[in-house]
Image: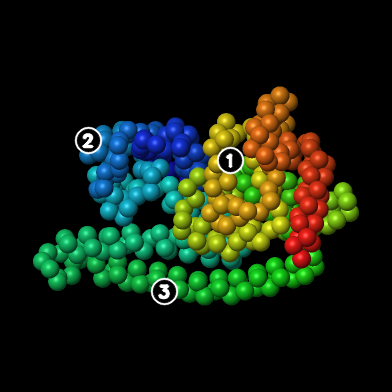
Amino acid sequence: MKGRRAVLAALDLPGRPFSPSTLLEELELLLGNLGIRSAGSIVQKRAKPDPALLFGKGKVEEMALFCKSLEADLLVCNDTLTPGQKNNLKKETGIEVWDRPFVIMKIFELRARSSEARMQVEMALCRYEIPHLKGLGEQMSRLGGGIGTRGPGETEFERHRRKLERRVRDIDKKLELLKKKRILQRDRRKKMNFPVVSLVGYTNSGKSSLLRVLSGDSTLVAEDRLFSTLDTFIRKVSLPSGRDIMLSDTVGFIRDLPPGLVAAFRTTLEEIVSSDVLVFVLDAAAPDFAEVLEVVEKTVEEIGGGEIPRLFALNKCDLLEEEESRAIEDRIREEGEAAISISALTGTGLPELLKTLDAFIQKSNSIQEEGN
Ligand SMILES: Nc1nc2c(ncn2[C@@H]2O[C@H](COP(=O)(O)OP(=O)(O)OP(=O)(O)O)[C@@H](O)[C@H]2O)c(=O)[nH]1
Ligand SMILES: [Mg+2]
């Protein structure tokens, strides 16, 4: 993939929460994580997507010329493409066409280390590819002529599709076994009576850095890359009261996390839902802080963790002036939430974070006791 040059394309639709420039910047960052360079970008304002091409016909012609003049060998659309749109765009531009979910899945594929993460990513990629192959098969059979005749290549697409479907069933079985193992582990942890606290947040917000510094385990990997953590890591951490907790770090979120990936990583994400407290780790220095916060809240809600007590760790405060940090803290507190500015890098705010966590767990314990 290295050395490829991509043209990035996005639709500017009415009522979208994010501006096309924010989306394209993030898409460029995502591609950079695959070693693909952006050669240029195109945005089209439209009332709604075109069913056949996503963009308007004239715009696609312009796009084809643009790609040619920039010697790009890849067109990446920020919007999700239907199999038909993908094929049509490929035909019109003469180069390979990807969409954003596919880019995210390719990063996951690159990062996956454990056999579970690898299987989950493969499952998501198979599930993504199957309908696209169906589309190709149907197109090929139309090319073949009259009703009932088989077109050239149709059988080959069919064979490949059936192979992928078999693979999905196979992985599904293996993941089911792993899931059982995980549930047993979770039950064992519950029996030990350690409260479980999960770090959740956008990719690259500093979750692994925080777990690393709080647990003192320097083998945990934290780096300036998107989705560097795809598995769940759990470490014991002692709170100021002397109470021990299990602190867990897991896969990060992003805008429009492809549904296929969410489904494939369901077991990993479900670990979050069984936590006693969630710590939202946010990059307070990110220019799109408010939008990112919304994405994290929405994702937690979607996986069923909306009711779990939460506290906000406003990370990377070393990159901000004190009054900037204070303003963000105030904004979150106005919503009635607990917020603490921290830096996993310099250690600022960490004692206070642990103290607050202690109080949270104390409170949730006494609520549970009242309930019993
Ligand atoms: N300046 C600054 N950088 C930080 C801080 N915390 C983390 N970082 C940097 O942010 C980058 C991402 O950190 P990670 O801990 O890997 O982030 P993550 O949330 O685990 O990311 P994923 O696993 O990709 O979801 C790394 O380059 C860290 O060094 C901080 O408090 N201040
Ligand atoms: Mg990480």
The reply to whether the residue tagged 3 has its Cβ within 8 angstroms of ligand 1 is no
- What residue is disc 1 on? 293
Say how many tags the image has.
Answer: 3
Q: Residue at x 47, y 40 (%)?
A: 27
Work out whether mark 2 precedes mark 1 in sequence or the reverse, and give the earlier one.
2
Q: Residue at x 70, y 67 (%)?
A: 186
Residue 246 lies, with reference to residue 359, above or below; the image says: below
- Label of residue 166 in the image: 3
- What residue is disc 2 on? 58
Q: Nearer the viewer, residue 161 or 94?
A: 161
Residue 243 in percent (x, y) is at: 85, 56
The extreme left residue here reads 146
The reply to whether the residue tagged 1 has its Cβ within 8 angstroms of ligand 1 is no
- Judged by depth in the image, the label closer to the viewer, 1 or 3, is 1
- Label of residue 19 in the image: none
The reply to whether the residue tagged 2 has its Cβ within 8 angstroms of ligand 1 is no
Check disc 2 and give the amino acid type: Gly
